[in-house]
């Protein structure tokens, strides 16, 4: 068995609308593909979303690399940070605020739960 795993976006796919109780604006839909999972603690794949905004609260650590489109993350009580194609960023546990998709976007992600 190889110790290398390609993250292709062709894994298990889930499409859904953002939960109404988290919705801030628009009617965004998300699509997640899971290409890798280990020990129910580490997950990797691709995620995309249509335009809109919703509340988020992170208990997990996440690395994101934007493949296309643009978003803003607005921390509670803080200033918006904008990310676009080619940008990478990390969201640490305890982040809460608004995730706003400005242009339909796609990202690769790695999530780790402690």
Image: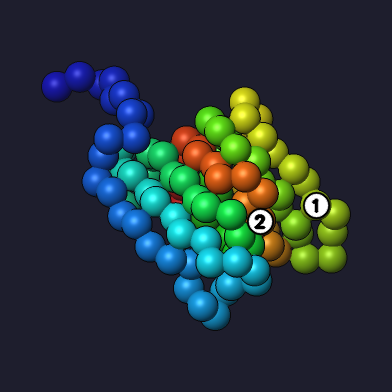
| SS of the residue under disc 1 | loop
Q: Which mark is residue 100?
A: 2
Label 2 residue SS? strand
**Badge 2: how crowded within 10 Å, few (<14), some, or many (20+)?**
many
Q: Quadrant of the N terminus?
A: top left
Q: How is the image coloured?
A: rainbow
Horizontal side of residue 47 vs 1, given as left or right: right
Q: Earlier in the sequence, mark 2 or mark 1?
A: 1
User: Which mark lies nearer to you, 2 or 1?
Assistant: 2
Q: Indicate the position of residue 72 as horizontal and vertical percent values.
A: 71, 49
In the rendered structure, find residue 94 and report the number of the disc placed on it: none
Name the side, left or right, on which 18 lies relative to 11. Answer: right
The answer, for residue 25, to whether it is visible in the render is yes
Q: Quick check: 24 left or right of 81?
A: left
> Image quadrant of residue 47?
top left
Residue at (34, 57) in percent of width and height: 15
Q: Residues within 10 Å of mark 1 (few under 14, many from 20)?
A: some
User: Which residue does the numbered mark 1 point to in the structure image?
Assistant: 80
User: Where is residue 111 shown, x and y percent of the image?
Assistant: 46, 46
Q: Give x and y (percent) for residue 78.
A: 84, 59
Q: Residue at x 56, y 45 (%)?
A: 104
Q: Between marks 2 and 1, how big is the CA–CA gap?
A: 9 Å
* Contact flag, marks 2 and 1 (Cβ < 8 Å): yes
Does residue 63 appear in this view? Answer: no
Q: Residue at x 76, y 59 (%)?
A: 75
Q: Is residue 10 above or below residue 22?
A: above
């Amino acid at each position: 068995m190889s110790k290398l795993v390609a993250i292709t976006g062709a894994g298990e796919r889930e499409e859904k609308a953002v939960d109404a109780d988290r919705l801030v604006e628009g009617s965004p839909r998300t699509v997640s593909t899971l290409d890798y999972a280990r020990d129910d603690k580490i997950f990797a794949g691709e995620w995309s979303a249509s335009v809109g905004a919703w509340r988020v609260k992170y208990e997990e650590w996440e690395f994101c690399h934007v493949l296309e489109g643009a978003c803003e993350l607005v921390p509670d009580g803080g200033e918006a940070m904008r990310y676009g194609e080619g940008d990478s960023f990390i969201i640490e546990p305890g982040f809460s605020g608004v995730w706003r998709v400005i242009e339909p976007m796609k990202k690769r992600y790695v999530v780790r739960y402690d």
